[in-house]
Image: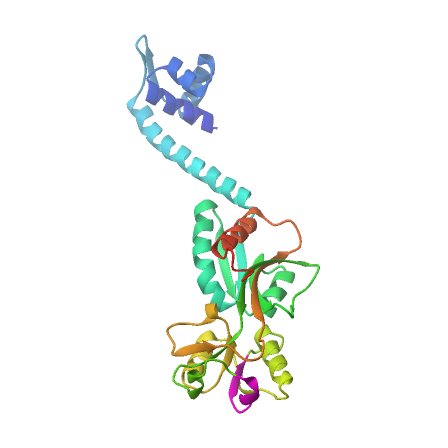
């Protein structure tokens, strides 16, 4: 049976042209080098190395075999590095849940740097915060990005660990071409006739803030549509068909929309990196670090 030591010895002899020098390079004794060569030659039933007073050189068959052996050792070395990197990352595949607006801005560069530093496959699952939390608790993702209202957190749990990344004030998104765009500040007491775009889940932060603010002025928001599709939300708002609550980082500049503050305090949206409240694999820890670096100083804005 051929082993890797035999191949290494053969390549060392090819490189150094001497059993003694090959032994020194491998930190073996000369008898050990001789033993491996003899065993390999007996197995192949062919002479691989010619030895004389001037040293040792490979026979034509030995040279041909050494070329193949070099490729084998290179592949084995690659495989060993691959396993070591995945072992050190703690994962082979890292699955991350995220909502679209932040995911498209923060995650790509963080994932690119993560993969430069550890060999890990990354899968991104797009979902709203409620679903991201459900996936995390079910073990279907290793981490996630969520948002919630700063003064009304929806995902407080001893099972979850949350690292704040961004803190932004809520604003009203409206069409740049609407009459409301001429106002510097909006008053919800005067917006009860406007149509609003709601999330598909009533528990999402923007819907909770919207209902809470309207209740302060004794009104109810008029719903035009329920959707979590950012393109749809922006398209409806740009056409003047409805308003939506949003933050600066969630606005897509390709659409003719703008943001306005309100007389009422709409509070702030907090974006957090969440994991289960247990020891994280190194790859998850590194992703958290990379995300914190990209949002440094904004979690307390």
Name the one closer to the observer, 36 or 158. Answer: 158
Residue at 65% across / 66% down in the picture?
A: 155
Q: Is residue 155 left or right of residue 176?
A: right
Residue at 47% across / 46% down in the picture?
A: 119
Residue at 42% across / 84% down in the picture?
A: 182
Residue 47 seen in the current view: no
Answer with the quarter of the image where residue 73 lies: top left
Q: Is residue 118 magenta?
A: no
Q: Which residue in the rendered view is the most extreme toward the top?
A: 53
Q: In the figure, 288 relative to 239: above or below?
A: above
The magenta segment is 187-198
Q: Is residue 25 left or right of residue 216?
A: left
Name the one closer to the observer, 26 or 8. Answer: 26
Q: Where is residue 164 in the image (x, y as percent from the top left)?
A: 58, 59
Q: Position of residue 169 (x, y in %)?
A: 53, 70
Residue at 47% across / 55% down in the picture?
A: 294
Q: In the figure, 34 relative to 192: above or below?
A: above
Q: Is residue 190 magenta?
A: yes
């Amino acid at each position: 049976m051929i082993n890797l030591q035999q191949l290494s010895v053969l390549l060392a002899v090819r490189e150094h042209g001497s059993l003694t020098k090959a032994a020194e390079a491998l930190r073996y004794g000369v008898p050990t080098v001789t033993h491996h060569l003899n065993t390999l030659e007996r197995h192949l039933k062919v002479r691989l190395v010619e030895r004389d007073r001037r040293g040792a050189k490979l026979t034509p068959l030995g040279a041909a075999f050494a070329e193949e052996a070099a490729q084998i050792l290179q592949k084995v070395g690659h495989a060993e590095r691959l396993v070591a990197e995945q072992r050190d990352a703690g994962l082979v595949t890292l699955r991350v849940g995220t909502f679209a607006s932040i995911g498209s801005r923060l995650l790509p560069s963080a994932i690119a740097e993560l993969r430069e530093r550890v060999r890990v496959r990354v899968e991104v699952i797009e979902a709203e915060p409620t679903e991201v939390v459900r996936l995390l608790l079910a073990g279907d993702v290793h981490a996630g990005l969520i948002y919630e209202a700063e003064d009304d957190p929806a995902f407080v749990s001893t099972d979850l660990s949350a690292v704040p990344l961004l803190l932004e004030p809520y604003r009203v998104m409206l069409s740049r071409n609407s009459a409301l765009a001429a106002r510097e500040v909006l008053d919800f007491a005067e917006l009860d006739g406007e149509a609003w775009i709601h999330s598909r889940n009533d528990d999402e932060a923007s819907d909770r803030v919207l209902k809470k603010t309207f209740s302060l002025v004794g009104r109810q928001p008029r719903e035009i549509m329920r959707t979590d599709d950012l393109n749809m939300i922006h398209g409806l708002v740009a056409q003047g068909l409805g308003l939506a609550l949003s933050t600066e980082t969630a606005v897509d500049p390709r659409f003719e929309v703008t943001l306005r503050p309100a007389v009422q305090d709409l509070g702030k949206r907090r974006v957090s990196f969440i994991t289960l409240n247990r020891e994280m694999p190194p790859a998850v820890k590194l992703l958290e670090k990379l995300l914190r670096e990209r949002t440094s100083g904004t979690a307390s804005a």
